[in-house]
Every structure is written in C-alpha cells, then in structure tokens.
Image: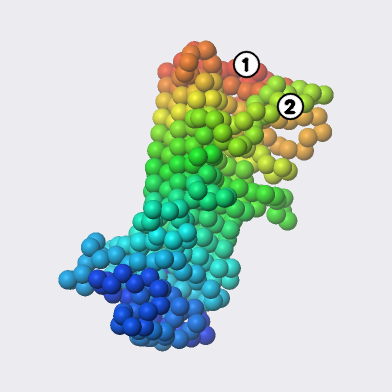
Amino acid sequence: MATLLTAAIALTAPTAHAAQYAVFTSSISASSINAADNYCSLAEAVKSINQGSPVANCIDEDTTNPGRIDLTQTAAKPYASFHYVLGGTTLTLSRSILITTAEEGDTAYIDASGLLAIMVNSGVTANFYGLDIRHTGTANGRLVWNAGTLDMSSTTIRNGNVTGQPLGKGGGIYNQGLLSLYSCQLLNNSAKRGGGIYNDDGHVPYLDATISGNSATMAGGGIYNMSTGNDQNMNAKAFMGLSGTITGNSAKAGGGVFNTGEMEVMGATSITSNVASGTGSGETCQPGPCAPGQTCQSVPCDGFGGGVLNLDFADVISAFRTNDFVTVSLNTATGFGGAFYSEGQLNLTGIQIASNTAKSGAAIFAAALVLPGDTKSNYCTVTSDLGQSSINSNRTVPSGGYSIVDSSGAGATHCTFAVSASGNTTPKCNPAGLIPGNSCPQ
C-alpha cells in the first residue's frame, strides 16, 4: 500500500498554488457548498482545489503539498458508519489533485446519488487512493467519467447504473483519457454497454482490478473497449492492459469482455464464470457463410463470446493477446464462442482454456473474414511459446457443435494450435477451422 500511495503522490506535478484540505467524517451529509454548516465538505474541498483558494469552511492546511484532499475519520465517527456524500463534482483546473485517505490501509466511503459522481476534465491529473465510491440513489448514475489523466489505487467503484440514460455507456467508469487502476474493484455496475467500464478511444495501460458482478443489457458485461479508428501508427486508438479477475459478469454479447480495439493480458489473470445470453445485443457479427464473390452473412452477436468477444470495427483490426498465467474458464455462451468469439487477431499463449460451454466453438469460435484483397490480418493462434497452455473439458450445449474450435469465413482456415488438450467433448475441431497442416489438439 505504501508503494502505491507513494507512486500516486509522485505522479502529481507541482501546481501554481499548492494546497491541502482535510475533510473529516461527520454527521452532516454535506454534498454541496454551504458556509453555514461549519463543515468543509468534499464538494467544498474540490472547489477550493479547483479555484486555488479556500472556500466556505475549508482551511488550507499546508501550502507546500500538491493539490491534496485528505479524507479523515475520528474515533467517534469511523469511516464505516459515517460516509462522505457527493451529489456530483468536477475536477476542472489543469493541475494535479490527490483525493486520499489520511491513513494508509483505511477505506473512506463516498456515497453518490446524482447522474455523475466525479468528472475529471481534460488537462487534469488526478489520483484517488483508498476510496469506496458507490451509487446510493434510486435513479441512474455513473460514478467516474475521465477525460484527463486518472490513477486509481486501492479504490472500489460499485453500484453505478446508466441503463436508463440515452447512451448508457460505462456504469462504473467511462474513460476517454489516460486511466490506470492498481488493486481496484469494479463491482455490481450496470450499463447498456460496458457494465463495469467503457473505454472510448482511451488508453488504459494498467487495469489491475477485480471486475465482478457487472452487467450490460446489450454488450460488454465487465468491459467494453471501443476503438473508433486507428492512430498515426495504424494501431487501434483504444488500448487496455489487463491484469486481475473478470468474473461473474453478464451481457447479451461479450459476457466478460467486448473488444473492438487492442487488449493485452499481463500477468496472472482469470476470466471466469461470465455469461453471454439473450437477444438484442445491438452488435453485428459475421460468422459466415462468407466466400470470395459473396456477401458475408451478418447476424446479431446475441449470445456470442461468453468470456471474450473480439470484433473488428470499421477499419480497426481488433487484437486480444495473452502472455502467461491466464485462465479462461467456466464461461457460457448460448451462441458461439464459450471462452472466445473472435473476428480479429487472437494470439494466446500461457493460457488455460477450461470448462467453457457454447452452442459451438466452446473454447474458440474464429470467424476471421479474410477476403481477396483484404488488408486485415486476422488470425487465431494458441501456443505455449511464453508459458504452458492447455485446452481442457470444454463442451457444447446442446451437443453437436465443436468443443475446441469452430470457424467460418473465406476459406475458413484460421487457427493454429500447439497445446495439450483433454476431456473436450466430441466432435472437437471443425477441420475447416485449422490452418492446413495443423492438427486438432488431443
């Protein structure tokens, strides 16, 4: 914890007017500016930082510090019983802000009931440490919208819900900027797309989090990674580096993850017990038939990608990569791709794919659409290059589909395997889904 807090503080740059404000737990449920209550609320402390001078009852305690807000409990009013209340606030000034618990290892609870708890504007560098931000209202509300640079450490985002909002993206977090999460949790958030987090052309180099119990009424129960185009180097604008646990999330497409950008799984990560089911995902897939000179068949992605749905968008080549110590297990798709449904680049190594179920392609459904003259480089590889990989005990429900890999598209020759396998139900591999000369794992 000390390392994370030190790192968070180190990332804050000097400001024109440094300041430190303390907000103590209180019986006052202050979420706005109220000079008459003799209490420095969280909203008042944020306004003090934004404008560079104290407002209302706030006192600048240490002008040598960066823009810092300490959330402090007292013995008579502990965090667990006395929560901070926030109707909604925006970090506006182009300066560095740290909102943290005064003591390492403590967790301060912030209750939000508005449409948006915290907005980080473009140009702002913010750090959150030791917070538990939850939506407590009866109406819809998102918890964090980041358009600047935001680092979150030891922080929980829970119970956000934007299913009733017009766009409905990102129940917990909506990101358009630079976002990093260290030892965080995204719990029980809901949205139309991206129940836990929606990344909109943003960059998330570190997403070290437990993402659990989130849901989407359309796509991306845990994560929706959206890239609307390529950068100057022809890479997807949206990038995520994943590490942690993605479990128990649900959506109509991409139960755990829906990816149209670039995602790289780093370190020990598990994607488990996620579900893709139902109709009305609002997403379009092309699982075939598709052959030279023919129009590819487009169908809804409904029920596709229990664990991960990896889908090209416009001219963006989606990519999902693993390197070591990754488990994708117990995921369910009522359609295709229990663990993975992919129409882009799927490069898996050091991975255990186990006990997933689907109508077909219980482990992988690879619908790579490579037509004559197509410049996209779509492929599917599962190897042990960087770590031992295996494909075990995957099955189709109802029986009759392929338990390891099914495939479609022009030529339908997409996947190569160099892994061990056991316990998968018969039939195992669609022969058309294997690169010529490659055999089905046994």
Q: How is the image coloured?
A: rainbow
Q: Is residue 17 above or below residue 421?
A: below
- Tell me the kind of residue under disc 1: Pro
Residue at label 2?
296
Of residues 269 and 120, the one nearer the viewer is 120
- Front: mark 1 or 2: 2
Q: Earlier in the sequence, mark 1 or mark 2?
A: 2
- Tell me the kind of residue under disc 2: Cys
Residue 96 x %, y %: 49, 74
Please tell me which residue is depicted at 48% across the width and 19% down the height of the picture: 396
Between the C-alphas of marks 1 and 2, the distance is: 20 Å
- Label 2 crowd (10 A; few <14 / some 14-19 / many >=20): some
Please tell me which residue is depicted at 42% across the width and 21% down the height of the picture: 393
| Quadrant into which the N terminus falls | bottom left
Q: Is residue 315 above or below residue 120?
A: above
User: Mark 2 falls on what kind of element?
Assistant: loop
Quadrant of the image occupied by residue 300: top right
Residue 355 x %, y %: 42, 25
Q: Is residue 20 above or below residue 212?
A: below
- Label 1 crowd (10 A; few <14 / some 14-19 / many >=20): some
Quadrant of the image occupied by residue 29: bottom left
Of residues 123 and 404, the one nearer the viewer is 123
Please tell me which residue is depicted at 35% across the width and 75% down the height of the picture: 41
Residue at label 1?
431
Please tell me which residue is depicted at 45% across the width and 84% down the height of the picture: 18
Q: Is residue 35 above or below residue 178?
A: below
